[in-house]
Image (cartoon, rainbow, N blue to C red):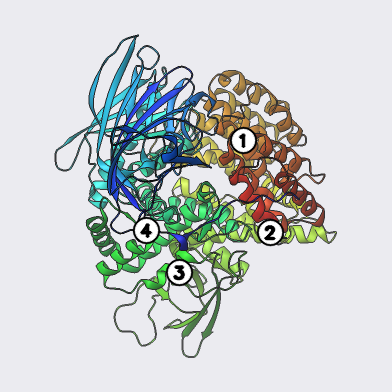
Amino acid sequence: MRIVKHSVIKLEDYEPPPYLIESVKLEFKLEDQETVVAAKIRGYRNPNSAIEGAPLVLNGENQGLLGIELEGRRLEENEYKIEDGILTILDVGDRFEIKIDSVNYPKENMALEGLYISEGMYCTQCEPEGFRRITFFPDRPDIMAVYSTKIIADKKLYPILLSNGNLVGSGDLDRGRHFVEWNDPFPKPSYLFALVAGNLECLEDNFITATGREVSLKIYVEPGEEAKCHYAMECLKRAMKWDEERFGLEYDLDLFMIVAVSHFNMGAMENKGLNIFNSRYVLADYKTATDTDFQRIQSIIAHEYFHNWTGNRVTCRDWFQLSLKEGLTVFRDQEFTADTNSRGIKRITDVSLLRTYQFSEDSSPTAHPVRPSSYIEINNFYTATVYEKGAEVIRLIHSLVGEETFQKGMRLYFARYDGHAVTCEDFLLAMQDASGRDLSQVKLWYTQSGTPELIISMTHDAEKEEVSLIIRQVTPPTIDQATKVSLPIIVETGLLDENGMEYPLKLKGEKGKAGKSRTVEIFQEQHSFIFEKIKDAPIPALLRGFSSPVKLTRQRSKRELLVLMSHERDPFVCWDAGQEYSTNLILEMIKKKQLGGNFEIDRDYIDVIASILLNEDLEEGFCAELIQIPTEKEICEKMELIDVENVHSARSFLFCNIGKRLSPILENIYTCLAEKYNNRDLSPGAMGARSLVNSVLGYLVGSGEQKFINMAFQQATTSETMTYTIGGLQALNNVECIERSKALAKFYDNWRHDPLELDKWFVLAASSTLAGTLEHVIELSNQPSYDILNPNRVRALIGTLSTHNPLHFHNAGGRGYRFLTDVILRLDKYNPQIAARLVTQLTRWKSYDEIRRGLMLTSLKRIKNSKSLSRDVYEIVDKGLKAI
């Protein structure tokens, strides 16, 4: 095996930069074949650096150096050196001004980092280390400077020239060119720099802040798309108002801009004053976007705006602290969505995402703490652990100190660190000082990987009328950490009787009034507590609100789960009981099948689903969540040794039987709700109703009756709203029938020229469980409509197959693995970041049978042995192979 060495960056090696930068003045000349960048950088020796006499070290990749001036004097070649992407200037003195001229080639930049071109538009992506592809600079987040930018370009081709901050100048030049000058008065790290140049249309609005300032709001899009920006603008204004009301945070510039681009590696980027978005998370109307699309747009628009304070004004000292800004901002966008929609449904959605992706990450070869201790390529750590688990840690802190004190801590955090680059400890210290509580143990959530498991035992003493709960926490070893310690955990608990009525809860010996729910804080390995005046053995409702990111290992009886599904008032616990019941049911069916038996239906489960559907007191969106059974991917995550064929068969059996046995109830709901709300109505109630309509339609089609197949075909081909169109297509997608083929063909014909809608078609093609899907995906990957250089298209086709279609990706002959390997090796030459994310599925080999294990390991070894492998892909592959 060829040995490849890549340097490992370690948190313990962090040192303050020897030089700080106070200002950066950039000039861009955007030409047809190349871009010339002039950077004038003023800096000084860092008084807090222990390194004396150090040279000035600047990062620079994929660009050509044209010349360097120090204090107006052009440097000779012996006064600096360039090696392995590092420009070293040997002697700059205590204070300096350097001017660096360089050239780069945006048209050739397929990695979509730094300055590149998307559909004829210049745009940038600098987080985490893209600025070094634009000019030579100490590209690290703890160097914050004031930026001014001048852009020169052909006026006809690029009439719109944008950058961070406020517009301070513009004018015409010779040869049909023009210029624009921008100034951002707030110091920022280089990763927040942004530039956009193109022929763009603009939707304009304004927002009046709490102090009466008028902020101009502008969303820029490609010509013809401006009508699809109104919802994004509404979301932005709601987010600005919410941040003022909930967090007391007001926007600080006179202008806030969003630009939508087609080629983008991430969802969006919070560049100061100029957010750049994947167009998928901006463009929407009821004809082209599903309700899920609208919800994602609301969340991501808010997330990037909230970064203005939690990420921009206060940023992270180094990339190990990434969750300082991302975990905190995810928590804020979750709270925004919960406050403006259904809090219960939002919590279910967030927990489902966490358990599906982050919990599996914790148990995989790529496991890492919320704050990693080392990395080869930081792009590989934009993960569910850093984002979603990081948000759960913030939520835990919020629960420990309460809303009022949490807001007090946030105010203290900004007062101390505004304009600074800080650490997770700095945030914890602000919360600790504001609350007066010792939060030092919370730091363990940042440094320890793995998902804690709570082993819970309950005993009831009928004579004393007491219930004793013993909770013991265990975190299994992970590949990166063998030894674990106890973490601070919050368990919110209720106790129900057999009829679902809540017991008043009072701890033994406790004074005061009893409540219906009790929050217990656990700081050691084992904790026990006793509730008094509990006459009969109760049914515990544990972890209400998913109060901590943990797993419960208590084996609950079917009776307990049925009572919780029918009566528990906490949305998460109620939903979770249904998920556990249906998962256990499917796993039992699989076990019987493996032993030569047949599948059997559970009438109690069917009955409780019927009662949920008939419960008119439930909000329709919540009802839709309660009747969903786990996906095949979610079921696979519950198995020590995954059997993809039987997972598919057992789940399909249960799904179809729900449709067959409950078809009268389901059909009645469909008829009553399908046209209850206007297609343009985006209220939580309307979205919930449409969600339930699509859910019941799926079950009806699963029953196999032709009239329901016709119903789905009618919905898929005649609906005016994309939510119903996709709902109809999804209902047909796993049914071998002519209606499916016709509906998909019509959708393709209608939307083949619209990239975002065509992505939906690719997702449907890659997610079908019908025979021949893998071959169809391989065929599609060779069609002109598939663009390997567009991350959205790669995610839609390849990502959907490898992540969400276990039946076909884990093809017994290994063809899915070989296909993915071919894609990764090809894509790595252009876009290592996206290629590395695809590799992750191959690292989960331990969960499969010996044959599949061998095939997945063969693919990993083939990738590792390839020539010129990127750091991104190498790091993931190496971790997968080290788990052998």
- In the rendered image, residue 400, in percent from the top left (x then y), is placed at 35, 68
Q: Residue at x 39, y 35 (%)?
A: 682
> Which structural element holds mark 3?
helix
Q: In this rendering, would 299 be left or right of 105? A: left
Local crowd size for mark 4, using a 10 Å CA cut-off: few (<14), some (14–19), many (≥20): some
Q: Look at the numbered discs 1 and 3 and tell me whether their residues touch, using CB distance below 8 Å.
A: no
Q: Single out the mark in the foreground, 1 or 4.
A: 4
Q: Between residue 379 and residue 760, name the one nearer to us.
A: 379
Residue matched to label 4 = 51
Q: Single out the mark in the foreground, 1 or 3.
A: 3
Q: Look at the numbered discs 3 and 2 and tell me whether their residues touch, using CB distance below 8 Å.
A: no
Q: In this rendering, would 466 be left or right of 634? A: left
CA distance separating discs 1 and 4: 61 Å
Q: Earlier in the sequence, mark 3 or mark 2?
A: 3
Name the amino acid, label 1.
Answer: Gln
Q: Between residue 360 and residue 598, name the one nearer to us.
A: 360
Quadrant placement of the C terminus: bottom right
- The reply to whether residue 679 is visible in this rendering is no
- In the rendered image, residue 801, in percent from the top left (x then y), is placed at 67, 40
Name the amino acid, label 2.
Answer: Lys
- The reply to whether residue 320 is visible in this rendering is yes
- In the rendered image, residue 690, in percent from the top left (x then y), is placed at 49, 37
Local crowd size for mark 1, using a 10 Å CA cut-off: few (<14), some (14–19), many (≥20): many
Q: In this rendering, would 659 be left or right of 333? A: right
Q: Single out the mark in the foreground, 1 or 2.
A: 2
